[in-house]
Amino acid sequence: MSALLEEIAARAPAHCAIIDGARRWTYDELRRDVLRTATALANSGVRHGDRVGILAGNRAEWIVTYFATMHLGAIAVGLNTWSSARELAYQLAHADVSLLFLEPRFRDRDFIELFNAANAIAPGLPRLRGLVTFDDSNGFASEFTAWRQDAAESANDAVAAAAPDDVACLLYTSGSTATPKGVPLLHADLIDNMWEIGQRQHLVSTDRLWLAVSLFWSLACVNALFAAVTHGATIVLQHHFDPTAALELIATERCSVFYGTPNMVLALSEHARFREFDLGALRTGVTIGTPAQVERAAALGIPGICNVYGLTEAYGNSTVTDARLPLAKRIETVGQALPGVRIAIRDPASGASLPDGTAGEIVLYGRVPPVYWHAPERTAEATSRDGGFRTGDLGLLDAQGYLYYRGRLKEMVKTGGINVAPAEVEQVLSAHPAVELAFVTALPDPRLDEILVAVIVPRRGATTDAAALTAHCRASLAAYKTPRQFRFVDPAGLPLTSTGKLERKRLPELFT
């Protein structure tokens, strides 16, 4: 990370790196700010391999702290701003976070209060030594500001300890189990893969990236951020997505690169004032989704929008369509493998290779982290016999190596572009005293692709309703993980196979 910033700053020191409202950083100013912050982190006791958590909206200090942590050889942990206290407690404890940076208030949430609630759930978090808050007027608050002011650049060489194969960041992603998985990403692949993603978009230093996707997600802090920085482009931050503010920001700052999920695209395209804004500078970027959703992004006025396939476990993306391919091709395929990545399609049961044109499980080789964080059993489950990463996704390759995504093998729901594990929601619902059994599935939704719905078998003699279960979920889960609909059935009403096993694929029938 340090070498990357040094290289870009040396090449164009006065070029704008970050725009955050009225605040601006050139690449040289960003480099200096990162060095000061890294030295301050070292002065506060952070050492190589320590985990530093970040809980905040899309503000410049998030990026500065992220890069400074990596500069030290410490590990940055991006924390979900939608987290409940239970979810935050799990991530802080599982990652052994030693220092936590947070924004005191973000949108309508009090993160100090949230942390205190998390600390009560997991008291005495073993390695956590303190909190550092971000302040609206000064950037960093508390004594950390003084440490930054006292940090001399002459000390920076002594604290730069990161190696290419060190873990740079630790991100949490939903899996097919009840708790999220920690994914450690390495410095070298983080930089190299994002350079290649930027190449598929044909990014140049004069590009301006609109970034409203939350920074704790890999689409933002891995894919978008490093694709832009490796090409010396400018990052235009939006603290959180709001369609009106997004249209104003894209138009005012003449943003040329778009990163957005399908629900964000829909919100912009259906905005009542959409045609009032000049989005003519937009030319390329990344989105995900069905052919119709990718086509809708292009219709926003982004002629070179790129379709992609990837996971957090694969450094953001493993395939990207080239921005110069005909749109008809870009909406049907998710692209060819990036350099450094190899894709195989295998039979999910036997592991045998399948021929071109045959759908099977997508298995990745190359730029994939070697392990899940502190989870050897999950690592083993996701590793094929020949060392590949089993994605749990269904796809096929054509003779030219283009990948066509065909859905998920794993029981995952993607709502508004965000993966949610039904098992996690089921675990929370089953903890309600009136719930005997809970099964979570998905229904199609025109805005969010899918919405979570729950089938509930109440306990004998107990009563509950949708409002009570919604409140119960909201107390323990991020809002997007809360089911939108509930169906209450007795055990005889569940769809079962002839051997008495639940047919999950038939659960949606209960909502028709």
Image (cartoon, rainbow, N blue to C red):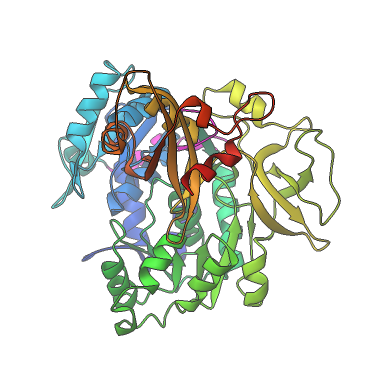
| Residue situated in front as seen by the camera: 436 or 413 | 436
> In the figure, is residue 277 to the left or right of 199?
left
Residue at (64% x, 61% y) in the render: 334
Number of dots carrying numbers: 0
> In the figure, is residue 135 to the left or right of 8?
left
Residue 203, compared with residue 137, is above or below; it is: below
Residue at (86% x, 51% y) in the render: 355
Residue 21, compared with residue 73, is above or below; it is: below
Residue 22, compared with residue 133, is above or below; it is: below
- Magenta span covers which residues? 152-178
Residue 415, compared with residue 276, is above or below; it is: above
Q: Quadrant of residue 126?
A: top left
Residue at (65% x, 41% y) in the render: 409
* Residue 478, image x, y percentages: 33, 39
Q: Quadrant of residue 43?
A: top left
* Residue 48, image x, y percentages: 43, 29
* Residue 450, image x, y percentages: 48, 52
Residue 502 shown in magenta: no
Q: Quadrant of residue 156?
A: top left
| Residue situated in front as seen by the camera: 271 or 73 | 271
* Residue 234, image x, y percentages: 39, 66
Q: Is residue 46 visible?
A: no
> In the figure, is residue 291 to the left or right of 83?
right
Q: Is residue 216 visible?
A: yes
